[in-house]
Image (cartoon, grey):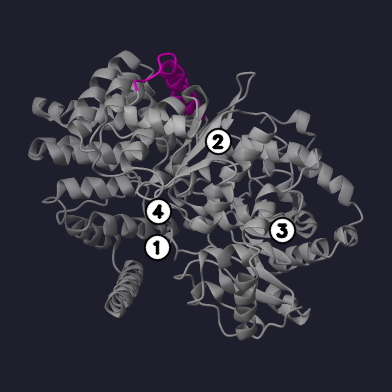
Amino acid sequence: MLKNISLLCLRHRDKRFIRMALAAFFAFFRGLFAMLPLKLSFFLIVLIRCFNVRAASFLASDFREVILKNTSMPHDFQFSSILTVKLPLETIAILVRLSAFEEAKILLAKRISTLSSNEKLLWVALDYFDLGEFERAQQVIDLCSADIKNSPALMHFKGLKALWDGVEDGASFYLLKAANHLSAGWCPHQNIAARYPNEYPPLLTDLNAGVIGLFFDAYHFLGQRVTSLGWGDSGVRLYDKAMEMQRCLRQVPPDLSAELKLWLEKEKIDFAELRILPWEWVTQIGHMGMLEILFRMRTLGWWSGQAVILAPLEKSANKALLKLFASQARIVEPGVNTTEAVAKELFSLQRYAGMNFNAWKFPNGEVVPWQQAGARLLRQWEVEQRAYPLREAFDAQYSDSALLAEVARIKADWGMKPDDWYVCLHVRDAGFYTEFQGFGQTHRNGELEAYRDAIDYLTKQGGWVIKMGGANSSPMPPLPRVVDYARLKVKSEFLDLHLIRHASFFIGTTSGLTNIAISFNVPCALVNCITTDAQLWSSQVRFILKPVISATGEPLNQREITSAPWRWRVFNAEVLRRYNAQVINNTPDEILETVKEVHHLARGEAQTDHSHCSQAVSLLSHWQASLAFPEFYGAALPSLYFLQKHEQTLLVRCHPSLRSG
């Protein structure tokens, strides 16, 4: 046992060393880019691409920031040079990452005859595809030699492209050929958050689903792909097609194995009533918050059926939280309470009976992103003044006196007295997902230092601040009445939940822990928020947003931010960069004043929120009219301080009926 623990510690230390080394590596090159000529910096990235594709992608993102700040660079500047002529493929790939498409296209046309490897040609085509340049990707494929047409990856690409073009007949041949030759080609797919296996031997139920089943998978995959590229409206259309494929499959019920039939009979589940919730619903704690909203939807009659949650032990983000759904669904843990064979067959059957994770279709035919439906549900739930089922389940499940005594002992070790009140704080940073600045979702992150005034305010009021998050989160400097719980050895899945449940209020952002605080009906001060999705926020929330500055230097107002196309362009840092938009973090005064408002709210002094703003009612009415649809932020309200400070830029400047969406 001790040996195993030592090995784990060594592995953890090795990971920390690797992270530190990578951070130093990227910091070195960021400094180097500022000193070297642009063409030489470009060559270095191309060279690194030869050895490490991922590292080169990160460096290209940093280098692009240097380019954007270089006001002296000619409009027709050429990055390629005699140094890169011997590395045409790598040069083209980096040009694509820098969005230097015209130069990449010219170089590709010149060098296509020298790129003898079909796999490398496909690599370039997929680079274009990943950036949403579908037609450019097709042009590369058209220039390839005939034998590349046997590549399974290319077949999959061509199938996706055909679906994008609305040609299902053309897509079926390519998707079938790809599925039969890719190692996980028949694996069901809804959302990449499920972390699907690289190897997936198909079951009979997969094969029987045939082309319609592959369309179900492909429409989901393509919907995510285009949404991440900033085309969320198209993503919703594709998710609707995936749901259409599921309706087609359900018209002819699948043949079930004898073992699964016995299991369904034992669980008293009629296949017609079976509703499968695959891995996506449990792999992140925020997704488990969505799961809680899904069951509220059933309570209000939005859907019906017998739910089965597929939750392999290695997939569940928080097992203590998962237990709270035991009264709502049958939780399947393969190898624990269900055989591997039954779990695999249920996983395969999500094409027939899976609850859609990406979109929701209302009875009137309206299709919206899933979170938008969830936000609409939450508003209805509050209008009907219903209870909070997850909070009630937690209180019933974890009321053991010995367990509560252990929590009290831990708090005492921190220096807290039994009647001390505290606030949970979560600042999203790059540690949890090991992100690199300017890449992926890093535009959602905050800087811990900006929260210092709010922390000082709370501790001077007699409260404590408990920092939540991952073990790799940025360390909190030693401060009186502040606990860096995220980095302590006592951290556990149960204690994460307990601390949030009993906090006076929660300070967070658009991240998963916020969903849990909402489900527990804990008041929330949400700051540094930026989102493509509608939010599952209650009336106990006050929030502030990261301003988004367009290429013209003008801040975007709320009508623009909550409408296409800008709503979808804030999905990730790369898309924002493509449109030369910048995101600004909230300032210390904005964070402090929002925290003060929620402190009053948590103490039952909601009217004090309005005391400093005589025109609060008019301002909030103007805010609501500025949104593209009323439920974008659930039932929450913006901080009045923030709203007043940014009134001229945040709200539409004329009557909403005179502005287009």
Up-down: is 67 above or below 338? below
Q: Which residue is mark 4?
A: 313
Q: Is residue 423 left or right of residue 341?
A: right
Dot 1, crowdedness within 10 Å: few (<14), some or many (≥20)?
A: few
Please report whichever mark, 2 or 1, sits nearer to the chain's N-terminal start.
Answer: 1
Q: Residue at x 37, y 31 (%)?
A: 260
Sequence-wise, which precedes: disc 3 or disc 4?
Answer: 4
Disc nearer the start of the sequence (4/2):
4
Q: How far apart, in angstroms, are the residues tagged by discs 2 and 3?
A: 33 Å
Mark nearer the N terminus (1 vs 4): 4
Which region is colored magenta? Answer: 236-255
Residue hosting label 2: 565
Give amino acid for label 4. Leu
Look at the image and tell me whether residue 272 can be seen. yes
- In screen coordinates, is 365 left or right of 265? right
Which quadrant of the rendered structure holds the C terminus? top right
For label 2, the SS is loop
Q: Which residue is mark 1?
A: 434
Which numbered marker is on residue 495? none
The residue carrying mark 3 is 522
Q: Secondary structure at mark 4?
A: loop
What's the residue at 21%, 58% (across, down)?
Answer: 52
Q: Is residue 42 magenta?
A: no
The residue mark sitting in front, 2 or 3, is 3
Q: Amino acid at mark 1?
A: Thr
Marks 3 & 4, CB-CB < 8 Å contact: no
Question: In terms of secondary structure, what is the magenta stretch mainly?
Answer: helix
SS at mark 1?
loop
The residues bearing labels 1 and 4 have C-alpha atoms spaced at a distance of: 22 Å
Query: How far across and how far down the image is residue 454, in percent?
Result: 70, 73
